[in-house]
Image: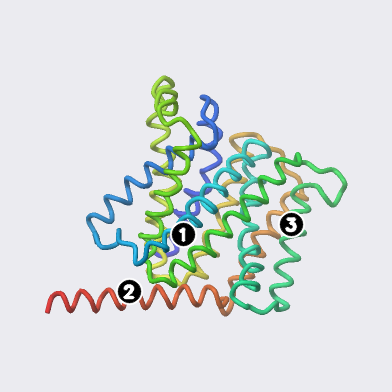
Amino acid sequence: MAYVWILIAGICWGLIGLFTKAITRFGLTELEILFVKGVVSVLFLTIVLMIRDKKSFRLKKKGDILYFVGTGIVSFTFFSWCYMKAINLTSVGIAAVMLYTAPTIVMLFSIVLFQEKMTRKKALVLFMTLCGCGMITGLFNGKLMLSPMGLLAGLGSGIGYALYSIFGTFALRRGYQSLTISFYTFLLASVFMAFCVNPIHVVQEITEAGQWPLSILFAVMTTVIPYLCYTKGLSCLPASKASVTATIEPVVAAVLGILVFKESITLAKIGGILLVVGAVVLMNIGKPSQSVEIAEKIESQNDENKKQDEKSALS
């Protein structure tokens, strides 16, 4: 069942392009859509933390808020905006595959930040990712299928998504649980976006268009449900296997793009998708990277400390 939970999460994330295309048709910008998604996610996580553990709202130090500025504003807001922009400027399938350059970018960041070594396997992963992106975008045959802005948005989504893993690892090192990290990520992202958009205008636009059900469904289907399912799956699977299973996301997005939006498909594009997804799978096969080991050890220690605290309280 753990694999089923992860597959459900990947499928839900693959629906982001479908919802983005539908919602942007009634006038909302990418940032306005993200604002709604962030607020709904904050409300949901607030309820969850109130029920599970109110102490999870506490920050260990005031300076720790900077970690969540990183996960919420520098990463989540940036990569989500770039991803939605890439969907509208390119296609659902291409945008999803460009997003999945993130694991390779994390690998490169980890070499610099966590002193991981560049191995032959990592070099092969980097080569496969670059070749896959080149085939998808038409770079190798001299017929670039993306506009410069579309290409930048796609790469930006991968970089922003990669930064979430980096900032998240630092937050885990400080002893924060994943639910706490997610709560402050969405909270700071929502506050930041509230200054970038006009919340009253967003509410009026959605109300006049009668699209509240679609907007809430978007947040629930692409954030709430996949988060719950992915977390449930992680409780029974190591992070490396979970991330490999979740690579069904770009496949689902590409298939939806072809079936729903009649996006073109070529042998080169299929080959590029397979190379990028294959690179993610290859990178997660075998011994996990140092940064992943650190995160898993910290999560395990946090869970053990929490159990000990609960036993002490009962005593």
Q: Identify residue for label 3.
A: 132
CA gap between label 3 and label 2 equals: 39 Å
Residue at figure coordinates x 87%, y 46% from the top left: 142
Q: Hey, what amino acid is under mark 1?
A: Leu
Q: Label 1, label 3: how many angstroms apart (C-alpha)?
A: 35 Å
The residue sitting at 62% across, 54% down in the picture is 158
Q: Mark 2 points at which residue?
A: 303
Residue that label 1 marks: 66
Picture coordinates of residue 102, whole percent (x, y): 62, 59
* Snapshot colouring: rainbow
Tell me the element at label 1.
helix
Residue 57, image quadrant: bottom left
Q: Residue at x 41, y 19 (%)?
A: 208
Judge depth for marks 1 and 3 and give the one in front: 1
Q: Nearer the viewer, residue 300 or 238?
A: 300
Quadrant in which the C terminus is drawn:
bottom left
Residue at 40%, 38% (x, y): give it.
217
Residue 211 spot, x, y in % from top left: 42, 27
Badges 3 and 2: C-beta atoms under 8 Å apart? Answer: no
Residue nearest the observer in this picture, 35 or 25: 35
Query: Going by the image, does 143 lie left or right of 47?
Result: right
Task: Give me the disc on residue 98.
Answer: none
| Residue 185 position in % (x across, y down) | 43, 53
- In the rendering, at what x and y percent does residue 259 appear? 60, 38
The single residue placed furthest to the top in the displayed view is 208
Q: Mark 3 or 2 closer to N-term?
A: 3
Pointer 2 or 1: first along the chain: 1
Compared to 90, does 286 lie above or below? below
